[in-house]
Amino acid sequence: MSSLKPLDSMQNDKIIDVAVGVIERTDGNILFGQRPEGKPWSGWWELPGGKLEPGESSTEALTRELKEELGISVTESRPWVTRVHHYPTTTVRLAFHRVTAWHGEPQGLENQALCWLSPAQALQTDHLLPATYPPLKWLSFPDLYAFTSASKGFSVEQLKSLEGSNDSNGSYTLRSLKPSTTDQIQTFLRKLEHALSHGIKLVQWREPGWSNHDPLHHQTFEAALNKCRAAQARLMVNSIHPQAWWQQADGVHLRQINAVALQARPNLSDQHWVGVSAHNLAELNHAQKIDADFVTLSPVLPTDSHAGAPHLGWHAFDALRMQAGVPVYALGGLSPSDLVIARRFGGHGVAGIGQFLV
């Protein structure tokens, strides 16, 4: 596992590397400090941290800074997101770390006021440093991301026959379908409900083999959306499906072929999220350009669906996620049990199909 170090390049003359701690209590509140008099942006609230010294990693710098600023000794932290932010007179590269355990009670050792706030409270605070807003949104992203496969068990004959079996008003009743189709849909919905009841809070509707013109498809999508709503979970829609569905649900997850066709963020409300599928640095850079909220990066490990295909491995995943600028979900050959190792290498969480909705 690596952590950010200053770059020995021309960029290093223009970019200041900073380690930032998102210090989280068990109640979900985050520690903020108010910049004291005599410093730029005095009176503004920020997340604790400071500049990297020559030869330091971001992990080492953060440990040192939190000891100097707050008097605490970090015992548990993990790398998270590295993001460049441009202020009027300087540019900083912020290596955010999530700090979840420490020794000592935080104190303002550099004359800074301190306060604990929930992310929602912090977003309502006056004079919050601009670079602090993105991580407050990222904290709302669940760490497990499940993709649907409602039509996976359908035969070709079933998929072909579905479009012709709707009633006069253009909709289906499950009783009008073959028992095997009815059973498969109900089984999927039961699996989804079970996963939601066991902590899945982010789901992607992804059914590439099922016609978008099939009324049953939209009915099943709406049934899944209702179950997600009831569980206070979010449902994203893969961009292979109609844009009206993106609006109806909680946002869109863009396939790479759709992401590269965009020069700006899709026209959705501020409440909708935008995810992007990425596999390399160029695709990660484009995701930043169109203001994606998060990305999936794949394949991390070998997969059954692409046997023999190259995969990233965890160290390459780590190197790429440090340049993503947004939270990264590890995808490919993974299950929920891989969350610990994904976090160790800077992943926000893990994503997948087979092991996530069971």
Image (cartoon, rainbow, N blue to C red):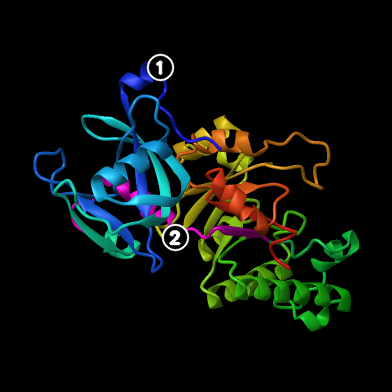
Task: Kindly state the secondary structure of the residue where label 2 is placed.
Answer: loop
Residue holding disc 1: 9
* Magenta run includes residue 349: no
Relative to 47, is 202 on the left or the right? right
Residue furthest to the bottom? 175
Q: Residue at x 79, y 36 (%)?
A: 309
Stretch of the chain drawn in magenta: 123-147
Residue 3 position, x and y percent, is: 48, 36
Residue type of the residue flagged with mark 1: Ser
Q: Quadrant of the C terminus?
A: bottom right
Q: Say which of marks 2 and 1 sits in front.
A: 1
Q: Which mark is residue 140?
A: 2
**Image point 52% across, 44% down: which residue?**
346
Q: Earlier in the sequence, mark 2 or mark 1?
A: 1
* Residue 91: numbered disc: none
Residue 93 % position (x, y) = 36, 34
Amino acid at dot 2? Ser
Picture quarter with the N terminus: top right
